């Protein structure tokens, strides 16, 4: 049985080690765009939440695929849905200018 804090298998670890730096580079670029004023802070925050949801979906896939006894993937999917909902709400606030931050 797994402790849910590590990786399910080696493939899971490799995928996370590849996707992690790519997402970090994308976020650095988006932060630069936000810093020079091309995107709003709310849009940047919404995109960050969507990337967190992406990591949760990857987690859920590997836990669902490789650990038949655990239902941890259900929690990962739930977290992803919550982050996606908050990301969409924040994105809407950023697009329609409903906030001043």
Image (tube, grey):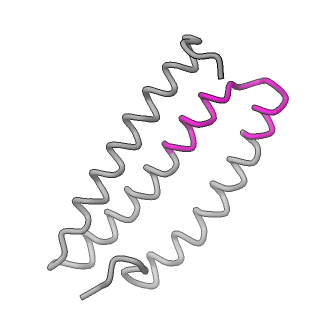
Horizontal and vertical percent position of residue 52: 49, 51
Is residue 78 shown above or below 16?
above
Examine the rendered structure and indicate whether residue 51 appears above or below residue 94.
below
| Span of residues in magenta | 31-50
Q: Quadrant of residue 33?
A: top right
Seen as rendered, the residue at the extreme bottom is 1
Q: Quadrant of the C terminus?
A: top right
Quadrant assignment, res 42: top right
Q: Position of residue 13 (x, y in %)?
A: 50, 78
Quarter occupied by the N terminus: bottom left
Residue drawn at (31%, 59%) of the image: 76
Q: For this view, does 26 lie left or right of residue 42? A: right
Q: Main secondary structure of the magenta part?
A: helix
Is 61 left, or right, of 44 in this rendering?
left
Give how far across and how far down residue 99 sits, in percent: 58, 16
| Residue 47 falls in image quadrant | top right
92 in relation to 16, above or below: above
Residue extending farthest right:
36
Closer to us: 90 or 60: 90
Write the residue at 40% across / 61% down. 58
Residue found at the very far left of the displayed protein = 69
35 left or right, relative to 57: right
From what the image shows, is residue 10 above or below residue 32?
A: below
Residue 83 is situated, as x and y percent measured from the top left of the image, at: 40, 43
For the image, the number of numbered tags is 0
The residue shown at (52%, 26%) is: 91
Residue at figure coordinates x 19%, y 75% from the top left: 70
- Assess whether residue 91 is covered by the magenta stretch: no
């Amino acid at each position: 049985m797994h402790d849910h804090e590590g990786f399910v298998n080696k493939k899971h670890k490799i995928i996370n080690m590849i996707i992690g730096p790519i997402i970090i580079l994308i976020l650095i670029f988006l932060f630069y765009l936000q810093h020079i004023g091309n995107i709003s802070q709310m849009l940047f925050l919404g995109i960050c939440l969507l990337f967190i949801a992406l990591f949760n979906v990857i987690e859920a896939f590997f836990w669902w695929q490789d650990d038949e006894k655990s239902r941890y993937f259900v929690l990962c999917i739930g977290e992803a849905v919550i982050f996606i909902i908050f990301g969409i709400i924040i994105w809407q606030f950023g697009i329609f200018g409903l906030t001043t931050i």
